[in-house]
Amino acid sequence: MTILVTGGAGFIGSHLVKKLIDLKYQVIVVDNFNDYYDPQLKHDRIKKFLKDYKFKVHQIDIDDYQKLELVFKNQQFDKIINLAAQAGVRHSLTHPFVYLKSNIDGMVNLLELAKKYKVKDFIYASSSSVYGGNKKIPFSESDKVDSPISLYAATKKADELLAYAYHHLYHINCVGLRFFNVYGPWGRPDNALIKFARNILADKPIAVYNYGRMARDFTYIDDIVAGIVRAMSKNFKYEIFNLGNCYPVKLTDFIKLIEKYLGKKAKQKKMPMQPGEVKKTWADIAKAKRLLGYQPTTGIDQGVEKVIEWVKWYYKIS
Ligand SMILES: NC(=O)c1ccc[n+]([C@@H]2O[C@H](COP(=O)([O-])OP(=O)(O)OC[C@H]3O[C@@H](n4cnc5c(N)ncnc54)[C@H](O)[C@@H]3O)[C@@H](O)[C@H]2O)c1
């Protein structure tokens, strides 16, 4: 089976690629290696796969239909997993247009090519951010998600609608995965855990938004990858799943955990709430458990320890 993974040099994408290669799939990656954060990290993530004959990478923007089509002309795909997107809630306040290009135009290009080249299965990254400021917790797939509070969230909700339209019109099987606060080794430098750990180690203050009154349903990368693999192994027509940990952690407890594994106190700079951010995320994972057999296994304590080990190793901090 040949799988197209867009965003395969990204945090989640590169972990997924490793898993798919281990499972003996042929994996083709499309990634534009943009400089939202240091592209060297993207190259470092995938360099271990480059020797593998089952792996190929194309540096292409999913917004570029013509270049993207060349990939489809040369290769028949069994499944597309679209993880390429402009991520980050705060960045969407200052750089709106890149979100439209990557998250909407890029998504439509891929759906069009799936239609034209008869790829039946399409899996894509949505986000917990679609729940916006919903008060009902935990967030369930059956909740209304009509009130995004950031442009990033609006593009992810748009992806779900686009997927539905292509499923309805062209019978492409579409599965949307709403990821909740994914963390792990090789994570993005803008991820709170990695940013906090690096700042604390460098004796720099950490920005604690909403004066610490926030909570996040942090989900370890291996659990997310297991969820994606389960989603691609079943034959759903059109579904949306929450992939979370179902265990929200208070920001203040999260910082204590980081301090514990670093053996060092953080200098905290208490800040007001940032526009676009939500106070709490919490995934109801009953549907994912029932239909995917999804069951997260890495708790926050163990996950934070692993990430801190990786931060020290990768950034060469003793
Ligand atoms: N990490 C999380 O907590 C989280 C939570 C919810 C949703 N998501 C979604 O999961 C997906 C992967 O996120 P991630 O954390 O791995 O982010 P990431 O930025 O590390 O990975 C995205 C990858 O896509 C590539 N990319 C971006 N725009 C592109 C374009 N136009 N054409 C080709 N490649 C492009 C980037 O170079 C990057 O390598 C994204 O769709 C993101 O919105 C992530």
Image: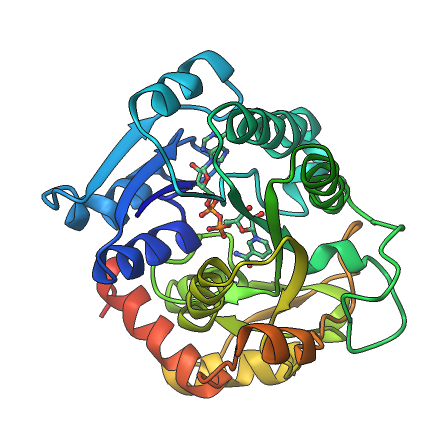
State which quadrant residue 162 falls in: top right
Quick check: 235 left or right of 43?
right
161 relative to 310, above or below: above
Q: Is residue 315 visible?
A: no
State which quadrant residue 247 falls in: bottom right
Instruction: Give the residue at x 46% y 12%.
Output: 66
The C terminus - image quarter:
bottom left
Instruction: Give the residue at x 31% y 28%.
Output: 75
Could you tell me residue 244's position as x and y percent?
Answer: 60, 72
60 relative to 48, above or below: above
Could you tell me residue 288's position as x and y percent?
Answer: 61, 73
State which quadrant residue 286 falls in: bottom right
Could you tell me residue 299's position as x and y percent?
Answer: 48, 86
26 relative to 267, above or below: above
Q: Number of marks in the image? A: 0
Could you tell me residue 192's position as x and y percent?
Answer: 54, 63
Instruction: Give the residue at x 31% y 52%.
Output: 17
User: In the image shown, does 4 or 318 lie closer to the viewer?
Assistant: 4
